């Protein structure tokens, strides 16, 4: 619903701006023809009041209200694809900016240099030529905003889509490696360069490795998830008594702590996935059960480091290669809630 509303508001913005430009220029020409015919010495302000009729401002206000309604729907529904939003808004701003620069600006300048405004200026002693051109352009708020925001949006889109993207950890499924409120950076080209929104890989770079912390879309959900890669395509995985075996080899665990010390309910362990180590947490009074699975070709088996409190591939299956977003590589801030101050104590690389 939120994404559909975005597309509707974007289309209406483009239509209203186009109508404003074409109809406004026509009204400008008619007004200046009348001034020239009657040799009326109006001031610059009087001319501009004819250029910008009431309906012009009203439609701009209408568009602003639509964008605020869309934003309110995002906050209330808490849905929507930010990648799609960024692509659509960037494309809209770019289209308006390009049309204004290479089509409509030339037509406005024609009015000023050769058309009715030039005729009118012969009878106006108060109008300043260059100032009038600038003020005429400034009466197009949609186009002016598009030209201002487009370069910024384009840079953000390129960086976010092909270089690195920030994420916030919303759940405790990756404790103790990642805590709720951690803000992480995800490398978008480690596993290949992909087009935003559609996710199609256009450049081969690398493949996920066992032990990577990866951001992806699970098969059952349109939201981002973050887990650890424990199984590669073709791997045979066995999970028995909370110990993982990959292709018949035990992934060794070393007990680091019992929490809380006097009446322990969980274990903090160091697990080895081949030559890579990371921390995991298991519950003493909870058992998710054992399993055995062979990972399908082109898929990856994901598990949370909080082994007994994680919705992962044990629940919804292996993740297709097409659903990969990127490799999480660093924590850059920790901010658990709006009632707390941000902290940078956890800044560092993700193991």
Image: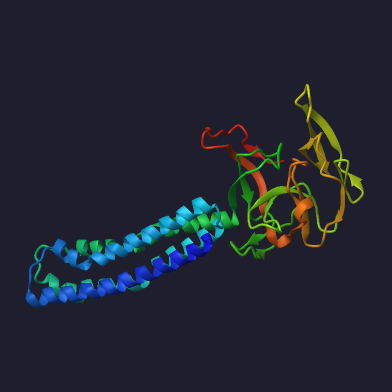
User: 32 or 126, which is in the foreground?
Assistant: 32
Residue 185: % across, % down:
61, 46
| Residue 159: quarter of image | bottom right
Residue 242 seen in the figure = yes
Residue 52: % across, % down:
23, 65
Residue 237 seen in the figure = no
Residue drawn 21% across the image and 67% down it? 51
The image's colouring method is rainbow
User: 311 or 323, which is in the foreground?
Assistant: 311
Residue 199: % across, % down:
64, 63
Q: How many labels, in total? A: 0
Q: Indicate whether 91 appears above or below 210.
A: below
Left or right of 236 in this view: 55: left
Residue drawn 15% across the image and 77% down it? 33
User: 155 or 87, which is in the foreground?
Assistant: 87
Left or right of 249 in this view: 279: left
Residue drawn 7% across the image and 71% down it? 40
Q: Indicate whether 329 appears above or below 85.
A: above
| Residue 337: quarter of image | top right
Quadrant where the C terminus is found in the figure:
top right
């Amino acid at each position: 619903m939120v994404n559909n509303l975005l597309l509707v508001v974007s289309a209406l913005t483009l239509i209203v701006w186009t109508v404003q430009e074409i109809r406004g220029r026509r009204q400008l020409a008619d007004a200046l023809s009348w001034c020239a015919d009657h040799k009326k010495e109006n001031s610059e302000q009087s001319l501009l009041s004819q250029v910008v009729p009431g309906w012009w401002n009203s439609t701009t206000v209408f568009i602003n209200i639509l964008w605020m309604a869309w934003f309110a729907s995002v906050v209330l529904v808490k849905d929507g694809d930010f990648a799609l939003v960024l692509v659509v808004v960037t494309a809209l701003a770019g289209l308006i900016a390009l049309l204004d620069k290479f089509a409509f600006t030339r037509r406005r300048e024609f009015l000023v240099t050769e058309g009715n405004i030039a005729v009118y200026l012969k009878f106006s002693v108060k109008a300043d030529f260059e100032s009038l051109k600038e003020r005429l352009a400034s009466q197009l708020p949609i186009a002016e905003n598009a030209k201002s925001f487009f370069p910024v949006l384009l840079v953000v889109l390129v960086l976010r889509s092909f270089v690195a993207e920030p994420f916030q950890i919303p759940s405790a499924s990756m404790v103790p490696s990642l805590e709720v409120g951690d803000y992480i950076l995800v490398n978008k080209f480690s596993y290949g360069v992909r087009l935003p929104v559609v996710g199609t890989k256009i450049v081969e770079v690398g493949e996920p490795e066992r032990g990577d912390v990866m951001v992806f879309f699970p098969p059952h959900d349109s939201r981002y998830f973050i887990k650890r890669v424990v199984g590669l395509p073709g791997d045979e995985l066995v999970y028995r008594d909370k110990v993982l075996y990959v292709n018949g080899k035990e992934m060794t665990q070393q007990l680091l702590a019992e929490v809380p010390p006097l009446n322990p309910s969980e274990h903090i362990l160091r697990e080895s996935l081949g030559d890579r180590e990371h921390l995991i947490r298991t519950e003493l009074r909870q058992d998710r059960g054992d399993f055995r699975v062979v990972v399908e070709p082109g898929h990856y088996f994901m598990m949370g480091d909080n082994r007994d409190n994680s919705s992962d591939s044990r629940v919804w299956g292996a993740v297709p290669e097409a659903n990969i977003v990127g490799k999480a590589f660093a924590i850059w801030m920790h901010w658990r809630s709006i009632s707390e101050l941000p902290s940078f104590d956890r800044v560092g690389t993700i193991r």
